[in-house]
Image (spheres, rainbow, N blue to C red):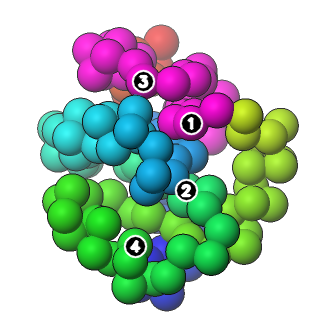
Amino acid sequence: TQDGKNISIDELKGKVVLVDFFATWCPPCRAEIPHLVNLQTKYKDNFSIVAVLVEEDKKVEDVKDFINEYKINYSVTVGEPNFELSKMVGGVRSLPFMIMYDKNGKYVTHYIGAVPEEMIEYDIKRAIEGK
């Protein structure tokens, strides 16, 4: 993460997880952040967002400044493993690109581009309820 910590799969067990591939230079990515912050706050007990920065040569200090500026309240991962992860999910061709997993780590859905908060929230609720 931006603090040099690894995200443990155990931390995410039992939670619905939204993996958000993004870049700081991407206008739709920046526009979605307040909505993601709202959702993280609202569903914090059953839901976690992991933001995956897919930007090369981005300084950690710049990422921390970005996090503070946008008041991000969820984990942001930085570094080379992010590019490996993007390959593992089939390649990220447009941003933002988000993938939702249920409490058991099973794929639920994905979103390409900016998506209304209500749509993501609907899917979060269904995944939390196990539907």
Does the CB distance between marks 4 and 1 fall below 8 Å? Answer: no
Tell me the residue at 72%/39% (across/down).
92
Residue 61 in the image: above or below residue 119:
below
**Residue 41 among those drawn in magenta:** no
Q: What element carries label 4?
A: helix
Does the CB distance between marks 1 and 3 fall below 8 Å? Answer: no
Q: What residue type is labelled 3?
A: Ala
Q: Position of residue 115 (x, y in %)?
A: 40, 19
Residue 102 left/right relative to 76: right
Q: Give the Cα separation between the discs numbered 4 and 3.
A: 21 Å
* Disc nearest the viewer among 3 and 2: 3
Q: Which of marks 4 and 1 is nearer the N terminus?
A: 4
Residues drawn in magenta:
94-123
Q: Which mark is residue 52?
A: 2
Residue 93 quadrant = top right
Q: Which of marks 1 and 3 is nearer the N terminus?
A: 1
Q: Which mark is residue 63?
A: 4
Q: Which of marks 1 and 2 is nearer the N terminus?
A: 2
Q: Which mark is residue 95?
A: 1
Q: What residue type is labelled 4?
A: Val
**Residue 107 among those drawn in magenta:** yes
Q: Where is residue 89 in the image (x, y as percent from the top left)?
A: 77, 41
Residue 54 in the image: above or below residue 97:
below
* Disc nearest the viewer among 1 and 2: 1
